Each structure stands twice: as structure tokens, then as C-alpha cells.
Image: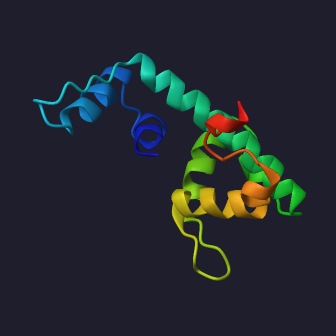
Amino acid sequence: MKIIGNKLVKGKSKKEIADDVYNSFDIDSNFNFEERYIDYWIKLFRQAVLKLMIFLDKNNQDTDFLKGNKSMHKALVYLNEFTDDTKRFRNATGFSVYYYQKQGGYRENPQFLFGTAYQFL
């Protein structure tokens, strides 16, 4: 979410984002984060936005705010501000778990909001 936010909200370049991620790790670790990974995360988030739209529509909730040229930015804001009725699930991480459970959990073998579990490939 931070990578997506840096790209969509702050308008940072791929190089700036890759440098930020790389610099947040210990220099002695052999961690390498390349600019090309940004494209992967953006593609993954784009897929999550489509899943979000299907999920909300299936649950009779408005999806119009997720349409148009600002859909990814609006989805980012929605996920960051999400809180369910019980207040158990909050922000993007909480929504991801909420989504997984509402789709049936492991018994139904649903897709995760952000990507696909290895066993479902």
C-alpha cells in the first residue's frame, strides 16, 4: 500500500520509490528492490481494485466511485479508511482479511484480495 500510495498519491517516480524501499533495509542485507517491481505491485493493485468492485457489487454496495480515471486512487483511499461494522477489521490489511472471510475462507478456496495464494495457482 505504501508503494502504491507513493506512486498514485505522491506521484513519485519508480526510481524514487525503489530507492526508498531499498534504503529502508539494512545496507548489509543483500536486499535488492528494482524499479521493475513497481510495475508488478501496480498490476497487483489494479487486480485488487477489480476484485473490490465485484465484491462491493455482489454485496449491493455502490461501486460508481471506483470507476473512471481516478479509480485506483479512490480505491487506495477506500482501503486505507476501511472499518467494518464491528470495528474488528480496519484499513487495507483488515479489509483483505474481511474480504477473505466474506468469500468463505479456506473452506471455499477463495482468491485473496491482493494476489492469489500459491495453492490456488
Classify residue 9 as left or right of residue 108. Answer: left
Q: How is the image coloured?
A: rainbow
Q: Tell me which corner region of the image, top left, top right, bottom left or bottom right, holds residue 98.
A: bottom right
Please, which residue is most extreme toward the bottom here? Answer: 86
Q: Which residue is painted at 31% across and 21% down in the image?
A: 15
Q: Which residue is depicted at the point 54% across and 57% down?
A: 92
Vertical comparison of 58 with 72: above or below: below
Q: Position of residue 113 (x, y in %)?
A: 66, 47
Residue 64 visible in this rendered orientation of the protein: yes
| Residue 101 percent location from the top left of the image | 71, 63
Residue toward you, 71 or 99: 99
Please tell me which residue lies in front, 88 or 15.
88
Residue 59 on image: x %, y %: 86, 63
| Camera-side residue of 104 and 69 | 104
Is residue 63 at all visible to an observer of this figure?
A: no
Q: Quadrant of the C terminus?
A: top right
Q: How many marks?
A: 0
> Which quadrant of the figure has residue 111?
top right
- The outermost residue toward the left is 28
Which residue is drawn at the image coordinates 57% and 44% (left, top)?
A: 73
Q: Quadrant of residue 104?
A: bottom right
Q: Answer above or below: position of 102 versus 20.
A: below
Q: Position of residue 40 (x, y in %)?
A: 52, 25
